[in-house]
Amino acid sequence: MRLILLGPPGAGKGTQAKRLEDLYGLKQLSTGDMLRAEISSNSDLGKKVESILAAGDLVSDDIMVEMIAHRITKPDCEKGFILDGFPRTVAQAESLDDMLENHKLNLNAVIEMQVNEEELYSRVQKRAEEDGTRADDNVEIMKNRMDVYRKQTAPIIPYYLDKTMLKVVDGMQSIDDVASAIDMILKID
Ligand code: ADP
């Protein structure tokens, strides 16, 4: 099973992706986590992207496409994967289609998690207070991340709607209820 979890920052994509990984052996591919790991290890790529992440802007499509292209064919993705944070632009979505086609792989679903803006701000603020390790978890940067989401990422919603792949989940529900809604979409019970 191969899925995309889509939604604004704070929508709960990571939480649901981790659950799907633990329960069903699908590999969570979080591009945000991958980039933060590059930054922590002080790699050349990490140095290049650090200020971009801190500002809440997007890393270039070329870098991101290469990062994912290398990952989806690894053995740990054999049972399937959950893309969390990719694609984030229409160009990335198009490149993903090419990659999948080249490897004769299909996508089972694109799940959009909908959460209202007020709730997103409050979740990110809570995460900043509890965790405090992410440079982009603060109100100022969150405004930019929301802007970037609206302008650059939201256009991929009609892209997948046109392909009749888009499913929508109410992300305002409890974590368990969101999980059940996703299971229903995937017909896992
Ligand atoms: P969020 O919790 O805001 O959804 P992520 O952890 O998924 O954030 O990503 C954090 C940051 O990493 C983004 O704000 C962006 O700078 C960078 N990033 C992650 N995925 C991508 C991508 N597919 N394209 C461009 N930049 C990305």
Image: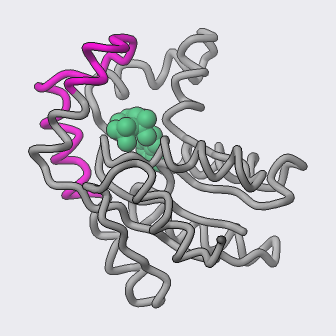
Looking at the picture, does residue 180 appear above or below residue 48?
below
Looking at the picture, does residue 163 appear above or below residue 183?
below
- Residue situated furthest right in the rendering: 75
Looking at the picture, does residue 62 appear above or below residue 31?
below
Q: Nearer the viewer, residue 117 or 140?
A: 117
Residue interval drawn in magenta: 125-152
Residue 188, image quadrant = bottom right
Whether residue 17 appears in this view of the structure is yes
Residue 70: x and y in percent read 75, 47
Type of secondary structure dominating the magenta stretch: helix
User: In the image, is 58 to the left or to the right of 148?
Assistant: right
Quadrant of image for the N terminus: bottom right
Residue 171: x and y in percent read 31, 57
Residue 138: x and y in percent read 19, 21
Q: Nearer the viewer, residue 71 or 116?
A: 116
Residue in view at x 84 percent, y 47 percent? 76
Residue in view at x 41 percent, y 58 percent? 178
Q: Nearer the viewer, residue 51 or 33?
A: 33
Residue 96: x and y in percent read 60, 66
Residue 73, image quadrant = bottom right
Q: In the rendered structure, does residue 147 fall within the stretch colored magenta?
A: yes
Quadrant of image for the C terminus: bottom right
Whether residue 59 appears in this view of the structure is no
Ligand 1 image-quadrant field: top left
Looking at the rendered structure, the number of numbered marks drawn on it comes to 0
Residue in view at x 29 percent, y 69 percent? 155
Q: Nearer the viewer, residue 79 or 87?
A: 79
User: In the image, is 64 to the left or to the right of 188?
Assistant: left
